[in-house]
Image: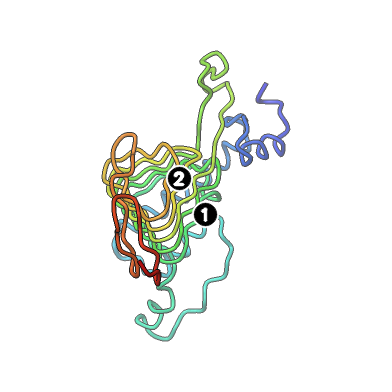
Amino acid sequence: MHRTIDPAENRRRMLAGELYYAFTPDLTASRERCKAACTEYNLQVTSGVAPRRKLIELWQKLTMDDTPIPPEAPTPDEDSDLLVDYPYVDGPLKVDYGFNVKLGKGVFVNFNSTWLDTCLITVGARTLIGPSCSFYAATHPIDPTLRNGTRGPEGGKPITIGEDCWFGGNCIVLPGVTIGNGVTIGAGSVVTKDVPDYVVVAGNPARVIKKIERPGERVLEEGVLEEPGKTI
């Protein structure tokens, strides 16, 4: 069945988070393209000799981002300053498609990350991601008859991560999760549901263990924050 489905409709279903077939020729080719791009990127980043500009170019190739990079500056230091807001992604890493991974300004991703980007995975500016973190925007049907191994349909849900977050090592984020701004995720956590702004979560499944006090706020009692400028 999946061999005769219209490729454009099948891809639309994937991007929309509907059931689709992953092992069609065009989607298989897309994953193979990304696998080759990952291999090239990993070789360069783990060599330790690739300049920052080269890694940015390879990352944009991997994610199919055609946004122009500013022309190279006269000196290495000036060029480094020019590129400071571009994401820094350490390797090795694994990505399924690449075009569904969007990283904001100043994002840092440590080594051994995994991105199953069936649907869009968005990471907000200045977020820091520890080693061996995984982001799973892909799902399978629970019904094993419908699932049917590699011949059955798959699904997906987008992952959205806010700005200024920090992920400890070995975190997992599951499909459909939205994480707010300023969140800290404890090492080894499995995030199964949405997380509000400015909290610390940890565990499996991850739960809120602490609220984060921001400048201009102070904690009045458990779960209550004073608003900046408010008179008590």
SS at badge 1: loop
Relative to the observer, which residue lies in front, 7 or 155? 155
Asked if residue 105 lies left or right of residue 43, the reply is right
Asked if residue 13 lies left or right of residue 110, the reply is right
Residue 29 at x, y = what percent?
58, 40
Q: Which image quarter is the C terminus in?
A: bottom left
Q: Quadrant of residue 192?
A: top left
Residue beneath disc 2: 95
Mark 2 and mark 1: span between their CA atoms? 9 Å
Residue 211 at x, y = what percent?
32, 52
Identify which residue is drawn at 50% across, 54% down. 62
Residue 134 at x, y = what percent?
38, 42
Identify which residue is drawn at 71% across, 39% down. 8
Residue beneath disc 1: 63
Q: Quadrant of residue 174?
A: top left
Query: Which residue occupies the extreme front position in the image?
Result: 232
Pointer 2 and pointer 1: residues touching (CB < 8 Å)? yes
The amino acid type found where label 2 is placed reads Val
Q: Residue 82: which numbered mark, if any?
A: none
